[in-house]
Image (spheres, helix red, strand yellow):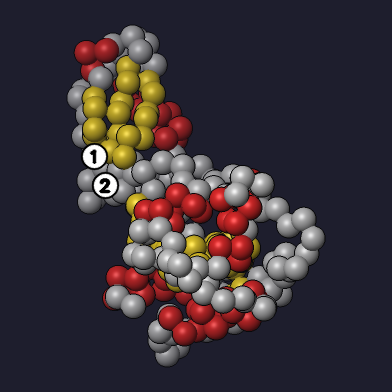
Amino acid sequence: MSTIVKMFITILLLSACSVVRNPTPLDYPGVQAVAVPAEDYHLQIGDQLDIKFFYHPELNETLVTVRPDGRISLQLVQELKAVGLTPQQLTEKLTKAYSAELEKPSIAVIVRAFNAQRVFVDGEVNKAGLVAMLGPMTVLQSISQGGGLKDTARVDEVIVIRRVGENKVTSMVVNLKLVLDGTDIRQDILLQPNDIVYVPKSTIADVNVWVDQYIRKNVPVPFGVSYGIGF
């Protein structure tokens, strides 16, 4: 496993102090995965924005990049910090900044390119690694970006590992076999940034145990870091 992949998983999982050990059992009848709404996106360094002025189109800006210092540069106002804000929060900040210059500072912030949104695809895929999220992405789409499935892939037990809250990760099982044969496309859930999609080669009897072993096997836990398993 490459250094960048280890760093990515470390950031996701070592920041989470415990693993939720009660996912839906694999043999539960009628299992259906559901999409979890993503939280409001917070702007990151490298994101590119369009700034639209409804009553002053001459001030419109396209592909404004959030600089390494977290700020953006626009006409008429001083440099503004954008990193960490939601598009709505930045809109309110710009409206306030331009209110001294314009009579009707009606502004919209549109995120055109996401720099920090990505997922990790691993297991029985042809090209494991980081996959950029340029927009909404499902499990099957992420696997396609990872070069597609190997012949040895077990598509009815694909695991999605996701950070939930500040101190936990949880796992979900999706049955892509039902998606591929058209039986239940709801299994192809929407991913969230930093999700890990793992395609197994054989049956995973206990998802909880596997998630624990996967994390411990692939993430080098440095001394002094407490890594607990929660319930």
Q: Secondary structure at mark 2?
A: loop
Q: Residue at x 37, y 53 (%)?
A: 145
Label 1 amino acid? Answer: Thr
Question: Is residue 99 visible in the rendered structure shown here?
Answer: no
Label 2 amino acid? Answer: Gly
Q: Residue at x 40, y 58 (%)?
A: 148
Q: Nearer the viewer, residue 229 or 140?
A: 140
Q: Are marks 1 and 2 in contact (CB under 8 Å)?
A: yes
Query: In the shown orientation, is residue 17 left or right of residue 220?
Result: right
**Placement of 47 over or under 9, stated as above or below:** above
Q: Residues within 10 Å of mark 2 (few under 14, many from 20)?
A: some
Which label belongs to residue 46?
Answer: 2
Which label belongs to residue 65?
Answer: 1
**Placement of 21 over or under 53, stated as above or below:** below
Q: Residue at x 70, y 53 (%)?
A: 32
Q: Secondary structure at mark 1?
A: strand
